[in-house]
Amino acid sequence: MIPVMKPWLGPEEAEAASAAVLSGWVAQGPKVAAFEDAFARRVAALHAVAVSSCTTALHVALHLLDVRAGDEVVVPSLSFIATANAVRYCGATPVFADVEPETGNLSAATVEAVLTERTRAVILVHQAGVPADVDAIRALCGPRGVTVVEDAACAAGATYRGVPVGADAEMAAWSFHPRKLITTGEGGMLTTNRAEWATRAKRLREHGMSVSAAERHSGGGAVVESYLETAFNYRMTDIQAAVGLVQLSKLDAIVRRRRELAARYHELLAEELGADVPGLRAVRDPEHGTTNYQSFWVMLPDEVAVTRNDVLARLAERGVSARRGIMAAHLEPAYAGHPHVGLPVTEAFTTRSLILPLYHDLTAEEQVTVVGELKAALRLPLPSH
Ligand SMILES: *Cc1c(COP(=O)(O)O)cnc(C)c1O
């Protein structure tokens, strides 16, 4: 079976985890601090706060903005469901906006269509690692006092107008789940250029404590902490951060390899399917940046007679583990009855797209197999040999 994704983990990560365990310091401590510094440098942000997942990073981000009941936060429905859920955690209302067909991301036009007096923030997702047009959306939101929080869960190593995604973000949330480019098993990060947000985020992840547990344990004297507000336990462990440091050192190599593999997919798709399926589209770099190809999605045109799910079933039978394209939260039972505007592009994406296998050590032969099987699954004429 060719899997859809495989993390690129090796003995270096195992040794780093082992060393963290043997050091006796396994909860949030010096490795988390080192991982935060290294990650902030890599994405050119001033501050990074490690947390337990991207989901909790998004929750902390909205909490920092004091988003609460009665407030609205604009989100794409076309995203992993955690994006919308983070808004509900605050008691606020997620407002779904449609996406643009080229990138699968929100645009200034789709956001503007759903802004109201109650809009407090927009969660702008760089979906599947394709950079969204942040400047256009901030130009729309800034003057209205609406904060743009970037959901960069999938976007480590992607670039926007020549700089890393997240470099200039008000706040950006990142994921280290194994489905993303680099992993700590579970884990997340919140980055920002505002010192006061970073300081409070560090408190919010740790029960609202005035002095972090790591500071208390490493300091010599007796330090008595106080609890300044009701907060959370969203800490990352030093074992995870030790793995994260090794993974981060591989990020450039991972992005380079994914972009090579994606270029090969583009060639193969054009050669094998181009003539028969003229409307077939696959994820590409937008004009304003470069993707890390976190997911290589392919969009089937309406003219294709077979359904996407039939294509997936046929591929699975033939040993190719593809996946449905990005989900749409508004179609899930958790959001049944939740009011929203028409979301035609979102619905086309989620029903007509699929994700092809792409991981660091995918081989050229495997790519040929994947495209050949996709061709067969679409019931296209096969070469007669
Ligand atoms: C994966 C993902 C998340 C959730 O990340 P976790 O670290 O698993 O919480 C949130 N948003 C998007 C867009 C994602 O792809």
Image: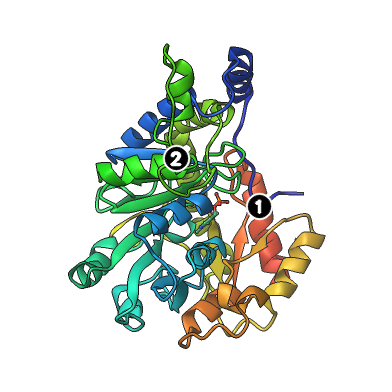
Q: Earlier in the sequence, mark 1 or mark 2?
A: 1
**Outermost left residue:** 143
Q: Quadrant of residue 64?
A: bottom left
Picture residue at 58% right of the left edge, 19% below the top: 20
**What percent of the width, then of the height, locates residue 12?**
58, 21
Decide which of 211, 250 is in the foreground and name it: 211
SS assignment at label 2 = loop
Residue 227 — which label? 2
Quadrant including the C terminus: bottom right
The label nearer to you, 1 versus 2, is: 2
User: Do we see residue 305 in this rendering?
Assistant: yes
Picture residue at 40% right of the left edge, 71% below the top: 73
Picture residue at 67% right of the left edge, 47% below the top: 366
Residue type, label 1: Val
Residue 171 is left or right of residue 92, and the answer is left
**What percent of the width, then of the height, locates residue 21?**
63, 19
Residue under label 1:
4
User: Do we see residue 30 in this rendering?
Assistant: no
Decide which of 146, 105 is in the foreground and name it: 146
Label 1 environment density (alpha carbons within 10 Å; few <14, some 14–19, many ≥20)? some
Label 2 environment density (alpha carbons within 10 Å; few <14, some 14–19, many ≥20)? few
Residue type, label 2: Tyr
Query: Marks 1/2: CA distance?
Result: 45 Å
Picture residue at 51% right of the left edge, 64% below the top: 270
**What percent of the width, then of the height, locates residue 148?**
31, 62
